[in-house]
Image (cartoon, rainbow, N blue to C red):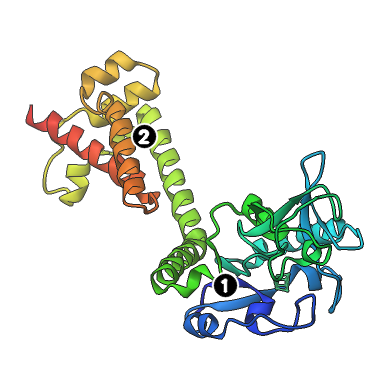
Amino acid sequence: MEKPRVGISACLLGQNTRYDGRSKGAPELVAALTADVEWVPLCPETDAGLGVPRPPMDLYRQADGHIAAITPEGHDCTPQLDAWIAATIPTLRRNGLDGVVLKARSPSCAIGSAPLHEGGPGLVGHSSPVPQGAGAAALAGETAPTLFCDGLFAAALKRAMPKLPMAEDEDLRDVAQREQFLSRVRFRHHLRRERPKRLVILAFLLALLLALAFVLSNSTLSRHLLLCPVYYLSHGRMTCPGCGFTRGWQALLAGDWRGAAAYHPFAFRILPLLVPVAAGHALLCRWQRRRWPWSAWLWTALGAWLASWLLTLLL
Ligand code: SF4
């Protein structure tokens, strides 16, 4: 069976892609997830052609607000990275991607933990000690930044695929967080695989509705085709109770709202109730931190329709 496709910073898989030619393998994390996912290794910096080894880089906010990845020598690697990102994200989307696990604190991969400096190398006058691994800023003798942001690749991925499950390697050391991430990945994978099936069902329902509207709006056809659920569900053994549902829709399709309400007093008046029912369902899903399934609309509409039909028969 096809596994969910999860992108991963290549250095976490043990590949020697880091600026110093080393890896930053996370064997425990990889071993814990390998049985459940298909890894898609990605290294923005190496794949963008920056080479291994390469000068380290850090993120600097420029005067115009944009964030640039700059080496200690002042070389701006942003255009090269941006070009790779622009070419890679559409391919990832096309091939299917159900989540990503990215390296913390990397100027390309980090999700909210990349140190952010102001200006450019040598422009920032810091005085406190430099953290290990702070890249260009560390080599330039600058201090620990107080601001953190997404790496360039992670930021672009968030913009392009806002619902993609994303996590840093360090977060997933925690078993509970790993399980939560995995369940979001599985859910997205399920939705991705089900998408063609859902489109076929939606197209079928649309065709059915159009056919129904055509039959109802054609008086000759609807006289010969008895559109009564009771009649059809009982295979003709029960006669149509004459609830006015068909005639109501016919009147509605002819633009006669009063006639429609007279034939079937509940069917159309109950429709506005769908809004609070749907809103309540959406709020419940949000509160329970789960997605609102599209089928909820279908069940809500079906429930309202059945309720209105029963009310008409009973009253
Ligand atoms: S760019 Fe990302 S994948 Fe490549 S070495 Fe840096 S952290 Fe690892």
Residue found 68% across the figure and 77% down from its top = 10
Name above or below for residue 177 compared with residue 30.
above
Depth check, front residue: 200 or 37: 37
- Secondary structure of the residue carrying tag 1 is strand
Query: For the view shown, which residue lies furthest in the left direction?
Result: 314
Q: Amino acid at mark 2?
A: Leu
* Residue 244: x %, y % from top left: 21, 27
User: Going 29% across and 32% down the picture, which residue do you hit?
Assistant: 276
Tell me the crowding category of disc 2: few under 14, some 14 to 19, or many 20 or more residues within 10 angstroms, Cα based. few
Q: Is residue 131 left or right of residue 53?
A: left
Disc 1 to disc 2, how far (Cα)? 51 Å
Which residue is drawn at the image coordinates 79% and 69% (left, top)?
A: 45
- Sequence order check: which comes first, mark 1 or mark 2? 1
Ligand 1 visible in quadrant? bottom right
Q: Which residue is mark 2?
A: 221
Disc 1 residue type? Arg
> Dividing the picture into quarters, in which one does residue 157 lie?
bottom right
Some atom of ligand 1 lies within 8 Å of the CB belonging to the residue at label 1: no
User: For this view, does 174 lie left or right of residue 4?
Assistant: left
Residue 272: percent from left, percent from top: 30, 26
Which quadrant is home to the C terminus?
Answer: top left
Residue 90 location, x and y as percent?
71, 59
Instruction: Give the residue number, with chain letter if any, for mark 1.
Output: 5
267 left or right of 46?
Answer: left
Q: Which secondary structure, mark 2? A: helix
Above or below: residue 244 compared with residue 146: above
Q: How many marks?
A: 2
